[in-house]
Each structure stands twice: as structure tokens, then as C-alpha cells.
Amino acid sequence: MRLFKKLIYIALCSVSLVAQAQISHGGLPLPKDLDAGPCLRSGSEIVRMPAFDVEELRREDSLAGNNVGGIRFAYAFDVDYTPENSGARYHLKDGRDVWRLHIVSEGAYSLNLIFDEYQLDDSSQLFIYTPDRSAILGSFTAENNSDCGVLATAPVPGDEVVVELITPRNSGSRLRVGNVNHDYRGLKYFPTAGSSQDCQVDVSCRGIHEQQSRSSVVIIVAGTEYCSGTMLNNTSNDGVPLLVTAAHCLYKEMGEVDESRAQRSVFFFNFERPHCHEEITGSLEMSISGADVAFSSTSSDALVMKLRRCLPIDYRVYFAGWNATRELGAGAYSFHHPNSDMRKISEEEDTPYLGTFLVDDIFDSNIHWIVDQWESGIMEGGSSGAALFDAKDLVVGALSGGDTKESCYRPGYDAFWAFSETWERGLKDCLDPTGTGRNVCEGKETHLFPCTRVTNWNDGESIHRVSSYEQFAAGHNNKGIVEYAEEFHLPEKSSVLYGVYLAPWQGVYSDRDTVLLRVYRGDSLPGEVLCQEAIAISNTAVARRSGVFEEREVSLWSMRDCYYRLKQPLRVDSSFFVGLKLVSSPTNKFALCHTEEKLDGKNTAYFKDASGWHTFDSAHPYYKQPTSLYIEPVLQEGGSSAIAVDDHLADGPASIAVPNPVEDVVTVRFPSSRTVLCYELVDMAGRLARKVLVEKSAEELSFRMDVPSGIYFLRMVFESSTETLRLVKK
């Protein structure tokens, strides 16, 4: 019997419309009606999961003895679906092959998949989507390959999902669906405002510990359970992606850590309510799949995992510092996701003390930091593995559990396994890999010059509400205005734009009603279009009503903090504009959120009509007031000054790049065989020219320098160090 329940808290999450169960690489699935030749293997695309006893699972969930482990939300079907034994395969006339598998598990609130064999070759693409294509994951490519050959995906809504593999003719790609996970609790449709108790506090409403908050992570464990964790730095400052959480999150049975569950987990970053807007749901569009256990101790509930992927710069993740001593000052806090709500903060004024947390005699005595009663917020089901930060903003432990009767009206205690008491049990080998002897470590950004999220909204500004579809000030309206832009002025001469956050008031996906994201050059008005990309908006979902599943219209993008990543990073000047262009005769109307009248009186929003561009406050027919659109770019600011290199260098002889200067192919020779996790190539403007995941042991690294002439910096990430080389492209 599975073991789980509220005594050990875990973090829940939901997946937004175009979630990335791992770093996705853009594109869309093929049309429903394929331009195909003869079938490779004729057969029904549809496979159906057998029925199971949902009420029995709910009964097990409610048993008082089920106290340890993550909160179960899904039933796992063990399957063996491959292009050779299931679904339908087609030859396309353009020379590609397609495999489609349509999976149905009746009554599911959502479905997620685990591919226990995933190895794609170049030019192959994998998509996972609902039959109506309202939710699309992917594409996943050869860049998502890993040594363990496993890929775990985020949930998609409803009880049907389509797997589509597109490969070159005679491809060597291998793919097998090993698990179909059926969400029977409806957690897919959380988080929503108010799912946690009234005394919980949104991180963005407090406006404190901003760096540390960006270290917290939401985890889907093996497709069936939820937990939370926190990214950690180590004494080498080398960027190895370590995550601390609770060992019980990987329990297969009581007190037994199943390391394969780490490989089949998905990790979500930056899930919080933006700008303390009660109406807007946070984004879950930044995720990575797969990890390995770096350290565990069931007797203390300690667990550290190492993610299998380097963190993209636009994820803006912070590696928290930590304190493995018993010296704690007064005050502590924790970030967590109570009862599936967005990231909250609980704060304590007193000093935590060492004590004993008894759960079926699993944990040793006096190895947990105890918080008696929080001054602000509490812990709820949904917080397991959350880090405890001390008064100096350093992690000292992670949540194991606490008082099951704790509430806003009856505060209880909570127990966090202590770094200080687990240090000599092997934790120090993980966090102090080179044996410096340090037991305190400061935090750091994942990149030397990190990205920032830029906004023109001021604290306290609210969203303008409109009831008439014909009078959207920043969308379709009966005046025929279809182009809008938001201005930005930055102190740096140039920056690199990676993506844009948008919050639509209303939006519907269709091939006809395309929404175009545009980036413009310009100082006072939008000018030359530097970049234009189409965005898919959708609001079709499947939900249960009165015990029956049916389609319904739900604006999944509406009032959501949606992140759109550009296909390629774009250099912009200190002044630029980002906006949207809509189709002029839509089947479904679209509108973007914008502020009520600006508190500072400064307008940053523009619209374009037949006579050209105008500011909202000078000429808008429906909203002639200062306002700002909900358009927020993610930028790496800085020019050539952003290239000062202070990366930790590997001990011993340095690597050598030959030839250098480079005409075509460069080879980096290592002093000895090393496991290369990934490498990045950055130009003198601070722009990322290339990022490649390697994850294999080698004595040298070779790649083609297919970039313009100039000076570049090659940053290589190894298992326990990083190294940066200067390269010149002829």
C-alpha cells in the first residue's frame, strides 16, 4: 500500500497551457490530416486504459496510518507502448515518418507520461498534446536525451492525450511510453487563489528575500505525487544544479528511497503570483525533467538531488546559501506551496531549536529544527521538502512534517531535518565536494550576469476591468485597433532579450486568429520590427461537472502569467518596444491586461491606428489615460562589460582549445577525462550564441564554430567545477 498524507507535507502544482515538462524547443504538431503515403504499420491510434477503483484509492488516501510520503494525486498504469507495437505509423510524402498514439484514460482530470526509453536522433521531434490541441508540450528533441534514457512530462488536462513522434526516414530514434499517470484527485485544476488557508502570505506581497525565493522549486515526483525543494550552492561555486528536499518524497515504501523516482521527476521554477495581483495565476512554463540522488539519509529524512540539465539563463534561478552549524540567530522563514497554492512565505521571529520528530520510529532523535508557531503563515499539506532559512538568509534544513491539526486558528509545530546534524552523515561530501572544511556557504546567481524581469507596473497598481468585448482598450474592439506596444528604457546601452511575460484578459487559440509578438526598435515611438513570432492562445479544456466529464470553455491563458520564450535571443538597444499584433477580423477576440490609471501618471502604452502610433493618454478612444500593458521582457542587461570572467576554474592544468583562432571546428582537450554536463558560448555583447547539453565523460570536446567572426567565451560545466576559455573566431 502506498504511504502518504498530511503529516508529511508536500508541494502541489498545476501546469499552464503550454508547459515545458522539460526545456522545449518550439514548433507545433503536424496537421490532423497528414499528407501521408502508405502506412508503415496500420492500426488504431487509440489505446484505452482499463478502469480502476478510484474510491478505494481515495479510501486509502484517507487512512490515518498513511502518514509518510508525498500526497498521491495520480494512479500509475505500467505500459509498454512503442512505435513497433502500438498506435499508427505513416510515411509522409516529404520523406519523414510519423508515429501517433492516442491514449484515453476515462475520467482523468489530467494525464502525464513517463518515457522509460527516450533516445532521439537529430531532426526528430516529439509532441504531446490534447486531441483539440488546446494544450501542447514540446517539441522535445535530441537535446532532451539523457544518460538514463528517461523523460518525464508535465500533466495535460483531461482524459485523453496524443503522442506524436516525427522522425527522418530510417531514423534510429527509440521511444517507449512506460507509465500513463491518471490524475484522479483533480489537482491539475489547482492552483487557484484561496486554495490555501486565509493566513498564508504570497511572496510577492511581502517583497522580501527576492533572491532566496527564486531558489524554491515545485516537483512532480514520478508522475504521481508532489513535493517541493530548493536549489543550493556548494563551496566550489561551480554551478552544479543541486536541489535539497525531503527523502520521503522518493519513498517507494516506508523508509525506502527509490532513486529511479528522481530520474522520472519534473521540476518547476518561478511559480508565484506576480506583483501581488490577486486576479493573476502564476506561471508554470519553466521546467526541467530528471535528476539523480546525490545524497540521502532516511534516518534524518535528508535528500539532495542533482538535476540532469543545466538551468537556462532566463529561468532566473538562484542557488541558495546554507549553514550547517548549530549557530542560528533569532528569526527564520520558509517558502512553500501550501495546499497547491502559489508560493507563500511563512515567517518566525524566535530561534528554531533542535528537537525530535517522531514518525513510526523512522527518524533519529534531536536531528530536526523545530519551529513552534509561525508569526506569519503556517505550513499545510503541500509544503514537504521546503527549506528553512535562518536570519542570515541561509538554508539550515528542509521540511519533514509537523502537527497534522495545525491551522490559522490553531498554530502548531513544524520539523525541518537539520543540516548541522546530517553534516557528518555524508551531506558535507555533497555540499563541500573539494573538502574545504567550510560548513557555511553563501548563495549565488546561476549565471555571472543573470537575467532580470522588467516591468513598468508600480506597486499597488491594479488591473483595469472592462465588460464590453467591443471596447477592449488593449485588444479587439469596434474601432478596428489591432496593434499595441509597451515602451522600455534601460540604463545599459544594449541587452539580450530572451522572452516575454504576458497576461491576457481573454484569449482563444485558433490557426486563423494568430497573435503575433513583436519587438520594435525605437526611442519615442515603435519603429523597425526586429522580431516577430506567433503565439498560440487557447481556452478549451475538459472538466468534470456533476460527476460527468465534458468539454467546457475555460480561458486558460486569461488572467495567467504566461511566459513566451523567443526562438532565438535578440539584442536590443537601451530603448525598445514590445507589443502584439492581432488579426483584424477574429473569430475569437483577444485582449491584454493593462493597469488602471497610473499612480505616477506616466504612460508607457501605445496603440496604432490608420494614422500611426499614439500614446494611450493622448488619443485612445476607450481609455484616454496613462496606463501600462502587461508585457514584461526577460533580459540579460549589459554590453561588453558583462564578460568579466570570474568562474571557478578546475584544479590542476587548464584545458587547451585548438586551433585558436578558429576557422571552422574547435577541439578542447582536457588534462584528463571529465564528465561534461553542458557548455555555453557567449559573445562579447553578453549574448548567448550557443548552449549545448553534453552529459558524458570525455577527454576532449569538439564542435563547429558556426558563428560570426569575433571574440567568444566558452564556459564548460563539469560535475564538480566550471572552466571558461577565450576563443577567437576568424
Image (cartoon, grey):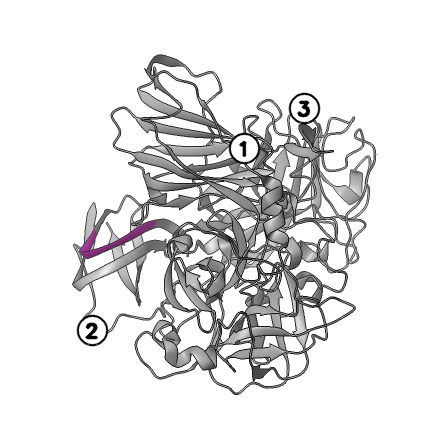
Q: Residue at x 31, y 26 (%)?
A: 84
Residue type highlighted by circle 3: Ser
Judged from the image, the secondary structure of the residue bearing numbered disc 1 is loop
Q: Tell me which label, 2 or 3, sits earlier in the chain.
A: 3
Q: Are marks 2 and 1 in contact (CB under 8 Å)?
A: no
- Image location of residue 651, percent across then percent down: 24, 73
- Image location of residue 659, percent across then percent down: 16, 54
- Image location of residue 460, percent across then percent down: 77, 59
Left or right for 96, reference 103: left
Work out whether 634 lies above or below 99: below
Which one is nearer the viewer's eye here, 209 or 301? 301
- Per the image, the residue denoted by label 2 is 652
Residue type highlighted by circle 1: Ala
Region rendered in magenta: 692-701
Q: CA distance from mark 3 to mark 1?
A: 47 Å
Judged from the image, the secondary structure of the residue bearing numbered disc 2 is loop
Residue type highlighted by circle 2: Gly
Q: Quadrant location of residue 725? A: bottom left
